[in-house]
Image (cartoon, rainbow, N blue to C red):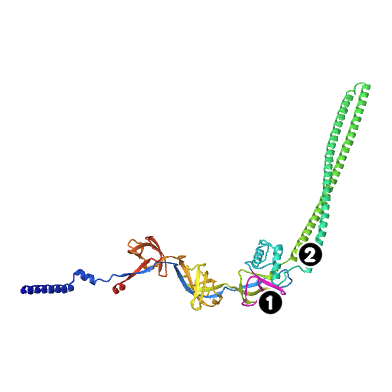
Amino acid sequence: MRSRRIVAAIALTVVAVASIGGYLVGSHIQSPAEVAARTAPPEASPILVPAEQRLLQTDIVTRGTARFVAPETVSVATSSLKVDPGVVTQVPTPQLELAEGAVVASASGRPLFLLEGAEPMYRDLGPGSQGNDVMQLEEALARLGYQTGPVDGVYDLETGSAIAAWYRDSGWQPFEATPEQIAAIRALKQDSLSAEKDRLSADDAVAGADADLASARAAKTGTVLAVNSAALALSAAEAEANAANLAAALDVAAKRRTRDSLLTGSVADLAVAEAELDAAEAVAEAARIAGEVAVQSARDTLTTAEAESAAAQSSVAAAGRILGNARRQRSLLNRTLAQLDGELASAEAAADVQLPADEVLFLPSLPVRIDQVNVAAGDQLVGPIFTATQLQLAIDTSLPLDEAPLIKPGMTVQLDEPTLGITGMGTVGRVADRPGTDGVDGFHIYAEILVDEAPSSIVGTSVRLTIPIESTGGETLAVPVNALFLAADGTSRVEIQRPEGLVFVTVEPGLSAGGFAAVTPVDGELNPGDLVVIGFDTAVASGA
């Protein structure tokens, strides 16, 4: 029994040793697959960033120096309402900023106001004036708070009242009638009344001459009828005389033939025939004389009628001349009266509120800043009196030849100078059409930026300008550019992390700027905040 126990123990020991040995050997011996698995590189971890809603734009960045816009020389027109230009008593103040309605200067106790308007003041304005200059005056008065009635470009009573109120509110007297003007108006009214009376008398003279001409023409018509009647009577008398003479001649001829046939006959018969012939000849002579008397009487009647007709024609001509003179006289009086009425209207208009041409300056844009003064106290207020700049700021800059074609007037410009705390906005006003203009070199093109928002302290300062060239126009879905890759079929894709793992979404790429690209999902869903793969980090996996 004891020997069996010893054998069993030895056997168990051998098995245990074999098991331990097998384990040790197995722990050091690996299959090829195990060896490959253990020596393969670690699995890379995706680098994920969120898709965003953001504004994308491409920019051109340059620098420029700020200034006020170019100075404009301001001149005063002359006024025909005044004998001489005024003498300057209040001089414009340099560097002063002037708004609409301000008094720029004064001369001989009269003001020089500043108003906004595109058309310069070139004439005196008063009642009856019409035009664009009157309309811009009415518009300016309305902006200043004065009621001008309809803004229609017609200077009427309401316009004059608004001007008078404006002047008085500003501490000045409006330009109105003088005693001399009032006296002239009275004299013109008297002359006009006298001319009106003369015109009425002329009307009566024309009416009388017209009636006389009508009467003369009627008389002329009667004499024409008398001439025609006398001519007919003469023709009848001549015809009757000719007929009587012919009948008498035939009778004489017959009686002569009868006598001649009896020359060889009895004496008694011949005596009778000769007596009858003598009687026939006497009758013929009497008929001839009677015919001549009748014809002459008819001819005398015609001559008288013709003379009367000629006299009537002369009367018509004379009446016509009298009527013509009366009408010319009336026309002359009408012109005189019209001229007097016009002079009276002008005088009365001049007696109302006027706006002299040398008391208002119209400038296209206000407010302005007086840059340089060209007159002194004691000078006459004529011609250029000062130069002014608008408060509009501009920035002069230059662009490389390859970038300038991308810049167009009207583009928005961002301006800033972080070191000075300056920010603002502007607009491209002008881009030169060739290099080397406006003081820039031949390798750059000049551009002017009109400043919309910026403090005037930037004048003379160099500021940074950012000009957006292309933009999405608002926030759009965007991913980093390196999140996009081109698939074998030519489509663009992004890889997105989903709960089930990484998935591909086909997208349509848009504008790229600042390392991002606008995308529109075409096949699949992509929303702001979704995590997209921009690469893989092997270091993270190996570290793990």
Name above or below for residue 314 compared with residue 490. above
Answer yes or no: do the residues labelled 2 and 1 have beta carbons within 8 Å? no
Amino acid identity at mark 1: Gln
**Image position, residue 334 (x, y; %):** 78, 57
**Image position, residue 525 (x, y; %):** 38, 61
Q: Is residue 308 magenta?
A: no
Give left or right: position of 33 versus 242.
left
List the residue tagged with mark 1: 90
Amino acid identity at mark 2: Ile
Segment tinted magenta in the rendering = 87-115
Judged from this view, the residue extending furthest toward the top is: 266
List the residue tagged with mark 2: 185
Residue drawn where x is 78% and y is 67% of the image? 181
**Image position, residue 407 (x, y; %):** 48, 68
Residue 25's quadrant in the figure? Answer: bottom left
Residue drawn where x is 91% and y is 32% of the image? 286
Q: Work out whether residue 120 can be spotted.
A: yes
| Quadrant that contains the N terminus | bottom left
Residue in front for this viewpoint, 82 or 143: 143
Judged from this view, the residue extending furthest toward the front is: 1
Q: Give the secondary structure at mark 1.
A: strand
Residue 281's quadrant in the figure? Answer: top right
Residue 484's quadrant in the figure? Answer: bottom left
First in sequence, mark 2 or 1: give its number.
1
**Image position, residue 503 (x, y; %):** 33, 63
Q: CA distance from mark 2 to mark 1?
A: 34 Å
**Count of marks overlaid on the render:** 2
Q: Residues within 10 Å of mark 1 (few under 14, many from 20)?
A: many
Mark 2 or 1, closer to the camera = 1
